[in-house]
Image (spheres, rainbow, N blue to C red):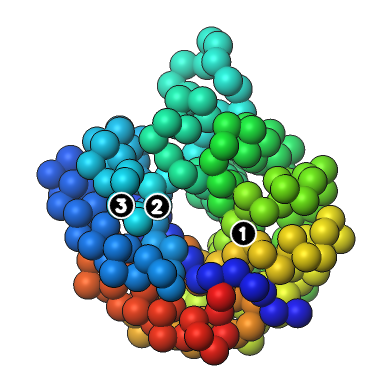
Amino acid sequence: MSSTTMPYVIGNWKMNLDVELAMALAEATAEIANEAADEVGAGIAVPSLWIPLISSEYFETSLLIGAQDCSPHASGAFTGEISAPMLSPWCSFTMVGHSERRQHHGEGDTLVRAKLDAIIANDMAALLCVGENQIQRDEDQALEVVAEQVTTATEHLDSGQLRNLLVAYEPVWAIGTGNTASPDDAQAMAAHIRGLLSSIDPEAALEVPILYGGSVNAGNAADFFDREDIDGALVGGASLDASGFAAIVRAAREMGGANLG
């Protein structure tokens, strides 16, 4: 079961960069996105403070600008939260369910589902992050864990909503560690995820980009892109370096004709 989507490379800046460095990196990344526009969807999920600044400069370019999280609530007494309606004028997508949110903020599958619904209801794409930790993998629970995460978040979506989804498989034990899943293991999980989505709509499932994340860099990206159900990458630390990010986008462009898109 291979996808019919173009590849995507999304950089997750996490809680990094002051305003000057952020604007400089956004400019460089926008140039990369413009060069690859017909072949790769290139984007960045940036700290919330910098979203309006970057979007004001680059929203009309090919660069996809996104948020790293949002509240499930549209408004109200939720101090410190940022809602999907507040993000939607500035963002084309918002991440949801990243492992660092699940781990450090106690976010469970039900909350992730509510956030995903808020994102889609406000005309943004939702980038759903899923993945198992080391203990779950060692106990052969990876498929079950990811199935629960994916199913809870998506089982109620209709075909149109499903087409407004990206899924990033990020094994928790690989994020920021320098370790990666093998390309074959990543492909097996990507195929598993696509199979779960196909229970909603088989045709729409082929159009959902499934990205691999977990210490992706210029040296290993092509090995993952060579697999039929992996449609790009969610990139952490390597996205903070324009040349490294460009190399990953270039790898996606080179592989796109044969295996992606």
Gap in angstroms between the C-alphas marked 1 and 3 = 23 Å
Q: Which residue is mark 1?
A: 167
Residue in the image at 37% along x and 66% along y: 37
From mark 2 to mark 1, how far is it between C-alphas?
Answer: 16 Å
Position of residue 186 in the picture relative to residue 24 (left or right): right
Mark 3 highlights which residue?
Answer: 61
Q: Is residue 27 above or below residue 78?
A: below
Residue drawn 70% across the image and 46% down it: 161
Three-letter residue code for mark 3: Thr
Q: Quadrant of residue 20?
A: top left
Q: Marks 2 and 1: which is nearer the front?
A: 2
> For the residues marked 2 and 3, what is the alpha-carbon distance in whole angstroms?
8 Å
Q: Are marks 2 and 3 in contact (CB under 8 Å)?
A: no
For label 2, the crowd category at 10 Å Cα-Cα, with few meaning under 14, some 14 to 19 and many 20 or more, is: many
Mark 2 sits on what residue?
Answer: 64
What is the x, y in percent for residue 55? 31, 40
Q: Earlier in the sequence, mark 1 or mark 3?
A: 3
Mark 2 residue element? strand
Of the two numbered discs 1 and 3 in the rendering, the one whose residue sits closer to the viewer: 3
- In which image quadrant can residue 54 be found? top left
Q: Position of residue 24 (x, y in %)?
A: 15, 52
Residue 169, visible in the rendered structure: no
Q: Secondary structure at mark 1?
A: strand
Task: Report the quarter where the N terminus lies.
Answer: bottom right
Query: Where does the image place residue 229, in percent across and percent down from the top left?
Result: 65, 77
- Residue 30: where, in percent of width, then height? 26, 57
